[in-house]
Image: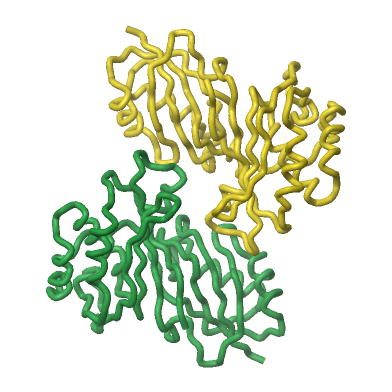
Chain colours: A green, B yellow
Amino acid sequence: MLRSYLICISYDGTDFCGYQIQDNGRTVGGVMLHALQRVFGEVVNVAGCSRTDSGVHALNYFISFKAESNMNPETMVKAVNANLPDDVVVKNCREVPEDFHARYSVISKEYEYRMYTTGVRSPFLRNHALFLRYPLNIDLLNDAASYFVGTHDFRSFMASGSKITDTVRTVYKSEVSAAENGLVTFNIAADGFLYNMVRIAVGTLLEVQQGKIRPEDIKNIIKALDRNKAGFTAPPHGLYLKEVNY
Amino acid sequence: MLRSYLICISYDGTDFCGYQIQDNGRTVGGVMLHALQRVFGEVVNVAGCSRTDSGVHALNYFISFKAESNMNPETMVKAVNANLPDDVVVKNCREVPEDFHARYSVISKEYEYRMYTTGVRSPFLRNHALFLRYPLNIDLLNDAASYFVGTHDFRSFMASGSKITDTVRTVYKSEVSAAENGLVTFNIAADGFLYNMVRIAVGTLLEVQQGKIRPEDIKNIIKALDRNKAGFTAPPHGLYLKEVNY
């Protein structure tokens, strides 16, 4: 019997060209498809919860697929992991209704962006957090970040060239905090994200920190519906897909 | 005027074939020498504080050298860092007496070994901590680790084939603890270490955890002066040179 499954994976995006399968380049989707085929033989309707860029990481990323199988979820997790390289891992697996889809069934997602400003760059964080040479004012950044919350047309925060036309999204959470380990994190949850939306939001927050714009200017940047009004696109290696709610 | 300097560096050992310069293979020593020569022209008496194996990391590693220079330490740090790849960084630099030597002037060193046992392996720790499929009993491991403290002939904890004849070392600290981030760390400080001593000590502690030997057996393993009596050599990627005291 063809069953529908949802698996949760985590990956270090450093050595991947993103999720989306491509002809050239090692992708998370490609590596996962190969492992699923090794375990199940044929798998169909394989769908990832989002496209992630090259270098972007995932703490929790979801993939739905259908396969003929009688394996229990625990055995399945071990079997798939035995066929994966060490920069990606299956955390858990569950059976889902037939019409479930990892991308279209998403209710909301949360991303985290990690930065640090300690005196000297860390070799250990080179691919995992953005190093900044200036201190961060958490209160100032939080003030700025709060303007993202709500239902807005986020066209100003979409990479130019993106073909999407419905650019209205609802942001539920947008917070900057100092973590214990010295990292500063920006957490943003929404019902959906435009292409590069989080990275452009981070770049804009950093321009607030640099004094180029004021926190309240973000209101007008959103209203402008113009990518040129927002800040730069922060690099991918600080970005993590943190949670997906179905 | 030829001045003597001591620089403190940190590196992620993942992509290095250890510290020691070799003809083939990218080494920390090779990369550092290249950067120092770019900044100072000629550098002489370049010495690292210890040999570290391929895959071993350093939070604080010291290199002494002599060069003709009038640069202040802060400028020097920036100049050298501008010539280094992103997996190694200079943290600070100071002038030292003429007869100072990064290796021979060492009073004591501390290593840290990182392990974790959370349900599933982490893609983010694949090169930075040892993943274990069984839980660790911190009290049991601490009991075992305590037998390393003191002045002993540690021949049983030296890689076979090592040519060193003076195998007596004094261990000042030997402790296992659970860190906040879910890691379990083994910290060991001594006036010196034999080749693979920390990794064999970790392998032996893990055999205590596995019930193959009792904590107090470590006393007899030390007395045996026989590598075959000690445990396996734990892999290099969990090991960090943490501190060096001069």
Position in image of residue B8 (x %, y %): 44, 28
Which quarter shows the N terminus of chain A? bottom right
Total number of numbered labels?
0
- Check the image and report above or below for B234 versus A63: above
Q: Please give left or right for residue B118 compared with residue A150 in the image.
A: right
Q: Is residue A163 visible?
A: yes
Q: Please give left or right for residue A141 compared with residue B117 in the image.
A: left
Residue at the image point whose x is 14% and y is 66% from the top:
A217
Q: Quadrant of residue B77?
A: top left
Residue at the image point whose x is 14% and y is 76% from the top:
A223
Residue A195 versus residue B7: which sits nearer the camera?
B7
Position in image of residue B62 (x %, y %): 49, 25
Q: Quadrant of residue B66?
A: top left
- Check the image and report above or below for A229 versus A45: above
Q: Please give left or right for residue B183 compared with residue A113 in the image.
A: right
Residue B140 versus residue A160: which sits nearer the camera?
B140
Position in image of residue A191 (x %, y %): 35, 80
Q: Is residue B23 visible?
A: no
Q: Please give left or right for residue B27 compared with residue B74 in the image.
A: right
Q: Quadrant of residue A133?
A: top left
Residue at the image point whose x is 59% and y is 81% from the top:
A43
Residue at the image point whose x is 85% and y is 35% from the top:
B229
